[in-house]
Image (tube, helix red, strand yellow):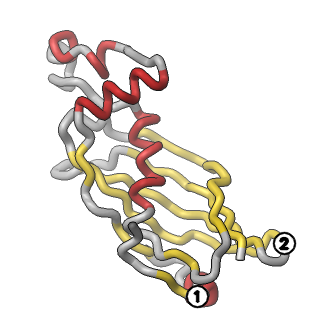
């Protein structure tokens, strides 16, 4: 559920350069990591074997970078206001993504979303570029930074 409500397209566009919002904290549990491993087939020990992972510099299992990235969509629902009268919003991809700090099992993350740009692609279609920073609670560096593109149809 979006806790930032709805705003008019003109107001949304006026927020270019501003932080639209930060999501609620979300725990990245070992169960979530294991389920992601099952879906993707990526069962590398650092993600799913707590005994072997304990002997690494991380001291525990860590989330897949792509799991953390996939949570950006979920985090956006509680952080980014919905554009009033939008018929749909479509994930258009990423211009860039960097995985900075591994997310340890049990850590909490949240996303901050800054509107970098909003341009009309064609009548009724607006492309947004969002700078996304996924923070890890009590960590100095973020889990990831990305530029995420969305197309909204009004």
Mark seen at residue 143: none
**At 58% across and 88% down in the image, what residue appears?**
8
Q: Quadrant of the C terminus?
A: bottom right
Q: Which mark is first along the chain, 2 or 1?
A: 1
**To which quarter of the image does residue 29 belong?**
top left
Residue 57 image point, x, y percent: 20, 21
**68 vs 74, nearest the viewer:** 74
**At 52% across and 75% down in the image, what residue appears?**
82
Alpha-carbon neighbours of circle 1 within 10 Å: few (<14), some, or many (≥20)?
A: some
Residue 147 image point, x, y percent: 56, 55
Q: Quadrant of the N terminus?
A: bottom left
How many numbered circles does the render carry? 2
Provide the secondary structure element on which disc 1 rests. loop
Residue at the disc numbered 1: 8
Residue 20 image point, x, y percent: 44, 75
87 displayed left or right of 7: right
**17 vs 66, nearest the viewer:** 66
Residue at the disc numbered 2: 122
Rounded to the nearest angstrom, the CA distance separating label 1 from label 2 is 18 Å
**To which quarter of the image does residue 104 belong?**
top left
Alpha-carbon neighbours of circle 2 within 10 Å: few (<14), some, or many (≥20)?
A: few
**At 26% across and 51% down in the image, what residue appears?**
26
């Amino acid at each position: 559920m979006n806790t930032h409500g709805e705003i008019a397209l003109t107001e949304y566009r006026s927020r270019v350069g501003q932080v639209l919002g930060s999501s609620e904290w979300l725990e990245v549990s070992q169960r979530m990591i294991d389920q992601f491993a099952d879906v993707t087939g990526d069962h590398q020990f650092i993600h799913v074997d707590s005994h072997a992972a304990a002997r690494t510099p991380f001291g525990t299992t860590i989330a897949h970078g792509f799991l953390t990235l996939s949570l950006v969509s979920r985090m956006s629902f509680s952080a980014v206001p919905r554009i009033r009268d939008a018929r749909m919003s479509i994930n258009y991809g990423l211009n860039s993504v960097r995985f900075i700090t591994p997310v340890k099992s049990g850590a909490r993350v949240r996303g901050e979303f800054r509107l970098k740009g909003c341009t009309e692609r064609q009548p009724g279609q607006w492309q947004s570029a969002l700078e996304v920073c996924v923070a890890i609670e009590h960590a100095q560096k973020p889990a990831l930074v990305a530029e995420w593109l969305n197309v909204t149809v009004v």
